[in-house]
Image: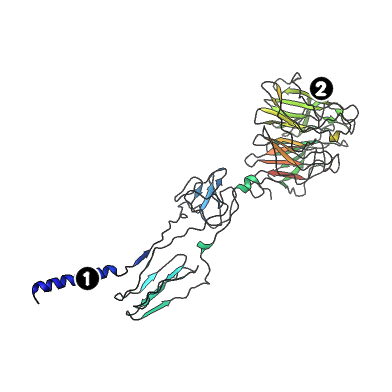
Amino acid sequence: MSPFLLVYTALFLLLATLAHASAVPQPALDLEVVERVDNDPDPTCSRGIVASDVCCLASCGTCGGEGCHLRPGRSWGCCMGTIRSRGRNCEFNGPPCSSPTGFSGTTAPPTTTTTTATTTTAATTTTTTAPSTTTTTAATTTTTTASPTTTAPPTTTTTTAPPTTTTTTTAPPTTTTTTTAPPTTTTTAPPTTTTTTAPPTTTMASNPVWQTVNTGNTFPTARHEACFVMVNGKGYLLGGRGNNPAKPVDIFDPATNRWTQGARPDIELHHMQCVAVGNQVWIVSSWTGGFPNEKNVGSIYIYNTASNTWSTRPGLPEPRRRGGGASVLYDNKIYVVGGNRGGHGGQATTLGWMDYYDLDEQKWVTNLKPLPDGRDHVGGGVVNGNKLCIAGGRDGGVRGFFFATKASTYCYTFSTDTWQNMNAAIPAPRAGSSYGTTCAGHLMIAGGERSDAFSQVDVFDGSSWTTTASLQRKRHGSGLAVSDCSCGKIYIASGSGSRGGSPELTSTEVYLPNGDSSPCAVH
C-alpha cells in the first residue's frame, strides 16, 4: 500500500473515531444549589424555638405594623430563618421564610436547606467507576452503575438520620456490586417536605379582646354609678351609691393585679365622670343621696393619690349644679357637659349646659355654648386631641326615661366654641355607659343600660363608629381607666350587672387591642 493511501486511511479512521466519540453520551450534570438563609451571624437569632407574637411569625407579612422585608443576608426586621421586630427576637418554631421579598400568605414556606450538587454518571462500555463517597445533609443519595449494556436510573433513599456514607463499588465492566450501610434511625420524610402553618400576622391587630383579670383574693368594693380613672400607673375607683358609710377609694395596681383600699370621702358621691389632674382625681359635678330624689353636690371633691386624703373647692354656682353629666380635661380646664338637676324624680330636668373650671385661674366659666341636644347619664372624651365628643345618654326628665336614650354624636371645637352634629349614630343607643379616650385618641363607650345592661363596646374615631370586642360581663355605671399605651390596655371595674342597681359587681376586666395572645395579655 502506498504511503499516500496509508496516510489517507489513518486520517479517515481518526475522523471516524472522533465522530463516534462525540456521539457517546457524556456524563449528565443535575445541579441544584439552594443558598441557606438561616446562617445569620447574630447569635441571638436562632431557629427552632417558641413563637412570640410581636414578630412577623411565619408569614413574613408585617413586623409590628411595618414591612418585613426578608432577603438573603440581614434586613431591618428579619434575621434569616428567624424573624425579629423592633429589635426583639421573634422566637419561631416553624420553618423560615425563604422568599427574597417576604411571604404574605398565612402559611410559611417550606424550610430551606443546603443541598450538595450531585453528579450522576451514566455507564459506558469503556469506563470503570472507582469507589466513591457521597454525603448529603437531609437525605442519602445512592447512585448504582448498571452492567456495561444497561444503564439503571439513580435510586434515592431518604432519611433524617445523621449523614450516612454510602460506598458504591463497581467491579470490572461485567459486574456491579452495591453495598449500602444501614441507616442509624427510622426513615422518615425529610424536613423539606414539611410545611408548618403559623398564625397570620393580622390576627393580633384584628382580634381585640376583653379578659377578666385574676385579682387573687382582692376585690374592689361592690358599687355602681362610680368612676374609674388611671393616675401614675394605678387605677382609682371612686364613689358609687351607698352612704352607710360612703364608699372608700379602691386602688388597682396593674403590675400585681391586686386591689388595696384608700380613704373615704365625707359624703356619698355618685353619677359623675372623674378627671385625673397630676396626682389628683377631681370630681367637679355629681349627685349625693338615694333614688329617686338625688341632690346636686355643691363642692368639687379632690382625692390626692400621694397623700391618700380628700379636700374640697367651691363647686358650680347655683343654679348650674347638676349630676350625671360628662367631665373632660383639656388645656388645664375641666369641662362639664349636659347632666340633670333633679335626680330621677318628678323634678328631673335634663340639660345641655356647658361650663368649665379653670385650674390656672381657679374659677368657673359658665357662658359657653350649650350642647344642642341635652342629655344625662352621659360621658365624653377628647377625640384626636382637639375635639370634645359626646354620645349616648338619655333624657331623664321624661316618663320611661330608661328608654329615652340618645343616638346622636356631637363634637365641640374648643377654639371656636361651636358644636357639630357628626351625623354618626352610636350603634346601640344606651345610657350610663363607661367612657374613656383610648391611646389612639378615640372615644370608647363600654356597657350601659336601657331595657337591660349592655356588654357592647363601641369606638368613635372622630367621624364614624366601630363595634369592638364585648365585655366579659354586661355592666353599667363605672368608668374606663386607660393604662400603658405601649400595650393600649383599658380597665373597667365594678358597676351594676343589670338595669338599675343590682347586682353590684366586684370583677375587673382589661381590654387588649392586640388580642389575648399578645405579650400584653394578662394571665
Point out which mark residue 265 bears.
none
Q: Earlier in the sequence, mark 1 or mark 2?
A: 1
How much space separates mark 1 and mark 2, taking CA atoms?
Answer: 118 Å
Q: Amino acid at mark 1?
A: Ala
Left or right of 115 in this view: 502:
right
**237 vs 179, nearest the viewer:** 179
Q: Quadrant of residue 241?
A: top right
**182 vs 49, nearest the viewer:** 182
Residue 237 at x, y percent in the picture = 77, 38
Name above or below for residue 349 compared with residue 264. Answer: above
Which quarter of the image is occupied by the N terminus? bottom left
Residue 107 at x, y percent in the picture = 56, 54
Mark 2 nearby-residue class (10 Å; few <14, some 14–19, many ≥20): some
Q: Secondary structure at mark 2?
A: loop
Q: On the image, numbered disc 2 is attached to which residue?
A: 320
Mark 1 nearby-residue class (10 Å; few <14, some 14–19, many ≥20): few
Residue plotted at (80% across, 23% down):
316
Residue 517 at x, y percent in the picture = 65, 50
**42 vs 47, nearest the viewer:** 47
Q: Amino acid at mark 2?
A: Arg
Left or right of 429 in this view: 17:
left
Q: Quadrant of residue 477?
A: top right
Q: On the image, numbered disc 1 is attached to which residue?
A: 16
Left or right of 436 in this view: 182:
left
